[in-house]
Amino acid sequence: MKFDASRRGKQVDLLLAGGQLKFYDLFKQESKMNDVVQKLLDLLQLRALDDCLFQGSSEDLGFKNVFGGQVVGQALMAAYRTVDETRVAHSLHAYFLRAGDPDHDIIYEVTPIRDGRSFSARRVAARQHGKEILTLMVSFQTPEQGFEHQEPMVDVAGPEDIVSELEMRRRFQDLIPESRREQLTRERPIEIRPLNPVNPLNPEKQEPKKYNWFRAVRDMPEGVRWHHCVLAYASDFGLLGTSLHPHGVSFFQRGMQVASLDHAVWFHRDFRVDDWLLYAMDSPSASHGRGFNRGLIYDRSGRLVASTAQEALIRRRMD
């Protein structure tokens, strides 16, 4: 097993003992990273039941319900499995209809809507227990050359000297309620390094903006569909919470009811999700118990590779 410490920008503690250099828990950590990423790839692989019918496993991230990014990523993969390999997804729009059950598989039924000379469209219905939990529309295009412009990337610090979200939580895990500790400190396939972190147990009011560097914790397979599906999965991390920033609350606080209502992703340019990407998020509005969030995703060179939008239920129960 090869571990490229310089590529991952990690500090490696070495212990000189008996004339030999020993890595301090390095291979154990790398093994865990491989395990969680392989589990994500297995989730996205899907099992074909028919030409347009697929079955996917569910993952329990400790959120009580299935993580929305998982269902979006799997639904996108199901759609990808029904189009020509020359077609690349450029946009998807999903509605979350019911909470998913992490203890049961999900069935994905793809309906081909159109296959034109340049574009293809697919509708995907995700079902559990005979009921639809998500509906997704995705559009594909054969890549072509055209006009180019983009919004520049905001000037922020690079990811190298920023502590990861997971490391911060583990440093202060004794302060995390025991009921939430395992959920917040477990290994994840996506590493997130927040530039303006919020303490979810004691949040303070701040402007509705968030900046996270993120990437998969190990190299991904080749093929654009893998990188698109993993980005669709990862794009649901952190976006909802942006609309909570101005109110000094978090979804871990008692009485808070939060849930994604919809999710949209636009893929603009090629990228690799195993290289650092900057997720610049903001929330221009919250009203009537709903928060609206937007995101721009850039690669290290400043290319805008994807955009996101999401409306979420953000409700404080008074009972």
Image: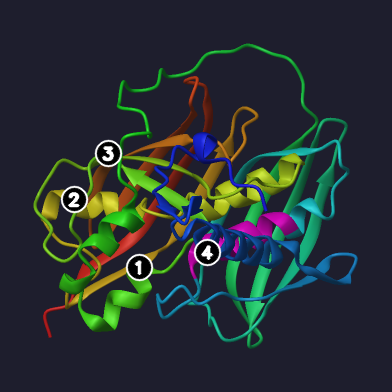
The range drawn in magenta is 67-77
Per the image, the residue denoted by label 2 is 245
Label 3 and label 2: CA atoms lie apart by 14 Å
Mark 3 vs 1, N-terminal side: 1
Residue depicted at x 70% and y 43%: 139
Mark 1 vs 2, N-terminal side: 1
- Kind of residue at badge 3: Leu
Disc number placed over residue 185 in the picture, else none: 1
Label 1 and label 2: CA atoms lie apart by 22 Å
**Number of marks drawn:** 4
Mark 4 vs 3, N-terminal side: 4
Where in the figure is residue 304, as x and y percent of width and height?
50, 25
* Callout in the foreground (1, 4): 4
Per the image, the residue denoted by label 3 is 195
Q: Main secondary structure of the magenta part?
A: helix
Mark 3 vs 2, N-terminal side: 3
Label 1 and label 4: CA atoms lie apart by 16 Å
Instruction: Say few, some or many: other residues with alpha carbon within 10 Å of mark 2 (under 14 / 14 to 19 / 20 or more).
Output: many
231 to 170, vertically: above or below: above
